[in-house]
């Protein structure tokens, strides 16, 4: 390890394998804090440049200094409350180099039994108990309970308490009728969906953990409940991935410069309460800000979250460049700062709009896959996705469930490698607000596309098997014509239905040869009234008269279908 001292012993920058690992602020009174106010040092910076940057950052008013010291004191108190081993463990978790818990069957079963004991003690009078009475299988599902254990590092008591909070929050946000249902995008109203804009995904860090971005400058809600419902949905979508449950997420709250909180901290307490009710394992939490007032808001969070989670928090105070540099030392890639634009979140005159004069959204590029326009997108990224599905659907269709997952992941990865993202428009077509779609939702959509491709192939094969072997007719169909494949109730089709109904029992009683003669008789009866057997042209440009063989084939099928329908209806 290399230790570099600068700024008259004010800051120690610890470097390991050329990666900045952590910054510790050494106060004059030897009080240790978790490097909240460290400035960034680039190798190419001279000593005087860095010293100048340091002093420019520290030009704070007395009030700002007081606020900063309050947060530092809270962080220091939480950090010093841990043992040396616990501090080391939390540092390893933060940097993604910790040893994961081995999920052996005996270990999981023992943890589940311990969870049951704690739930039995705590559940009386709770929303959890209400849900349990409504459907015991839902609350006791193994995968559901393991999700809470994973989110709390298999601490059964903490997991039980969180399960109770989970159902309390879910009931308050969505009502009793949704207690036993997974919350989907369809459960969110338009205002809820608009609140999703400040919650985004940013790929993964170098340890393979999902990076969860929050831009406070995007906050613009009509009612705080809209934002809380959106957050609940978003975080539960993340948990659909078992990999995310196991590895956890890294959260970045980015309030630098124009991304400062547009609501002046409104609803932070409620937001933290919702987040603590959801079993997402937060492996790291980074708060980026350029204003000490934003910095001071974190003091509220410190007082609400466990000491272990506080130890996995870092605050970065500075410009975009400085915060990006600090985040990169934790394996987080460049943020999409330049890919967003200002938009108006609500109509003029709305209270939320007055509280926040602007909001932000992602600007799609040509390689992105776009959803939410209620029509097939012509974006090049969508065309590329359809080409990938067309190449892979047959392997997907014939493969095992594991093969299907591999195919879907491969398609998603190719889109990402091509510089594309999967974006959903959560607003109108005229004024779109694009957000990055949760990865599990993307996988579901790609799998559905593979299945739809198979259906399209079957339809095409069916059309090939029904090649028109007759001649096109001149003019419009006649009243007594029978038109196959059309729903018009013509006189000819009514007469055909009458014949099939009248002679259905006779058809069923005949042998194969006599059935053919009966079908011929029906064909002749239609023709005797001046009717023809027609089929629409593939391009809908007119009608073709089908051959007698094709007509007999379709009538035989109509007899069989009538028999099945009569059996299903039963006696009248």
Image (cartoon, grey):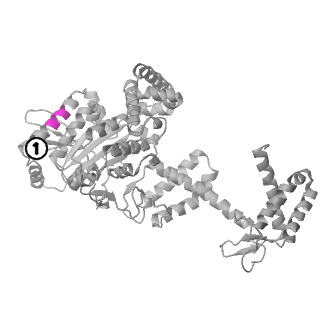
Question: Could you say which quadrant of the image residue 481 lies in?
Answer: bottom right
131 to the left or right of 363: right
433 to the left or right of 534: left
- Location of the C terminus by quadrant is top right
- Furthest residue toward bottom: 474
Q: Which residue is mark 1?
A: 64
Magenta: main secondary structure: helix
Q: Is residue 117 visible?
A: yes
Q: How many marks?
A: 1
- In front here: 256 or 550? 550
Q: Position of residue 533 (x, y in %)?
A: 79, 70
Q: Position of residue 170 (x, y in %)?
A: 40, 36
Which residue sits at x=39%, y=51%? 193
Q: Is residue 3 visible?
A: no
Is residue 74 a member of the stretch shown in magenta? yes
Q: Position of residue 474 (x, y in %)?
A: 74, 80
Question: Could you say which quadrant of the image residue 243 lies in?
Answer: top left
Is residue 282 a member of the stretch shown in magenta? no
447 to the left or right of 204: right
Q: Position of residue 444 (x, y in %)?
A: 51, 50
- SS class of the residue under badge 1? helix
Q: Which residues are magenta?
A: 70-76
Question: Residue 355, relative to residue 306: is it above or below?
Answer: below
238 to the left or right of 275: right
Which residue sits at x=72%, y=74%? 543
Question: Residue 529, relative to residue 35: is it above or below?
Answer: below
- Furthest residue toward left: 62
Question: Residue 504, relative to residue 209: is it above or below?
Answer: below
- In front here: 342 or 103? 342
- In front here: 214 or 16? 214
């Amino acid at each position: 390890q290399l230790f570099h001292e600068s700024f008259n012993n004010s800051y120690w920058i610890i470097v390991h394998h050329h990666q900045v690992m952590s910054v510790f602020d050494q106060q004059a009174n030897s009080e240790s804090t978790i490097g909240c106010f460290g400035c960034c040092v680039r190798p190419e910076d001279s000593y005087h440049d860095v010293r100048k940057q340091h002093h420019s950052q520290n030009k704070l008013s007395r009030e700002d200094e007081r606020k900063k010291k309050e947060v530092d004191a809270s962080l220091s108190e939480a950090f010093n409350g841990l043992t040396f081993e616990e501090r080391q463990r939390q540092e390893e978790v933060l940097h993604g180099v910790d040893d994961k818990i081995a999920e052996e069957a005996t270990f999981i079963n023992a943890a589940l039994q311990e969870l049951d004991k704690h739930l039995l003690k705590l559940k009386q009078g709770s929303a959890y108990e209400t849900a349990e009475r409504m459907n015991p299988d839902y609350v006791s599902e193994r995968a559901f309970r393991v999700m809470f254990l994973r989110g709390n590092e298999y601490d059964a008591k903490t997991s039980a308490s969180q399960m109770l909070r989970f159902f309390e929050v879910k009931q308050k946000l969505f009502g009793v009728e949704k207690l036993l249902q997974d919350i989907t995008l369809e459960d969110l109203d338009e205002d809820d969906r608009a609140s999703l804009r400040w919650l985004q995904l940013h790929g993964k860090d170098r340890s393979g953990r999902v990076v969860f971005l929050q831009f406070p400058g995007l906050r613009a809600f009509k009612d705080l409940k809209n934002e809380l419902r959106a957050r609940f949905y978003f975080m539960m979508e993340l948990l659909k991935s078992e990999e995310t449950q196991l590895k956890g997420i890294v959260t970045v709250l980015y309030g630098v410069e124009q991304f400062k909180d547009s609501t002046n901290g409104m609803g932070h307490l409620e937001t933290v309460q919702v987040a603590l009710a959801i079993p997402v394992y937060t492996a790291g939490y980074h708060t980026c800000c350029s204003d000490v007032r934003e910095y001071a808001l974190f003091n509220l969070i410190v007082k609400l979250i466990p000491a272990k989670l506080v130890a996995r928090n870092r605050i970065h105070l500075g410009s975009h460049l400085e915060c990006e540099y600090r985040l990169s030392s934790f394996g987080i890639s460049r943020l999409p700062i330049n890919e967003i634009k200002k938009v108006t979140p609500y109509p003029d005159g709305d209270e939320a709009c007055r509280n926040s004069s602007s909001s932000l959204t992602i600007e799609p590029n040509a390689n992105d896959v776009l959803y939410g326009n209620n029509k097939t997108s012509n974006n090049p990224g969508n065309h590329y996705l359809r080409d990938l599905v067309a190449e892979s659907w047959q392997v997907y269709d014939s493969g095992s469930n594991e093969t299907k997952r591999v195919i879907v992941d491969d398609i998603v990865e190719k889109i990402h490698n091509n510089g594309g993202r999967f974006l959903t428009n959560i607003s109108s077509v005229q004024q779109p607000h694009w957000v990055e779609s949760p990865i599990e939702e993307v996988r579901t959509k790609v799998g559905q596309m593979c299945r739809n491709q198979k259906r399209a192939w079957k339809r095409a094969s069916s059309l090939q098997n029904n090649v028109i072997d007759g001649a096109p007719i001149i003019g419009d169909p006649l009243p007594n014509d029978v038109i196959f494949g059309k729903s018009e109730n013509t006189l000819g089709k009514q007469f055909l239905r009458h014949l099939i109904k009248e002679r259905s029992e006779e058809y069923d009683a005949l042998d194969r040869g006599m059935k053919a003669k009966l079908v011929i008789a029906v064909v002749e009866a239609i023709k005797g009234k001046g009717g023809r057997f027609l089929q629409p042209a593939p391009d809908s440009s007119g009608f073709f008269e089908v051959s007698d063989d094709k007509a007999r084939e379709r009538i035989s099928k109509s007899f069989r279908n009538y028999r099945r329908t009569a059996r299903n209806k039963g006696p009248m």
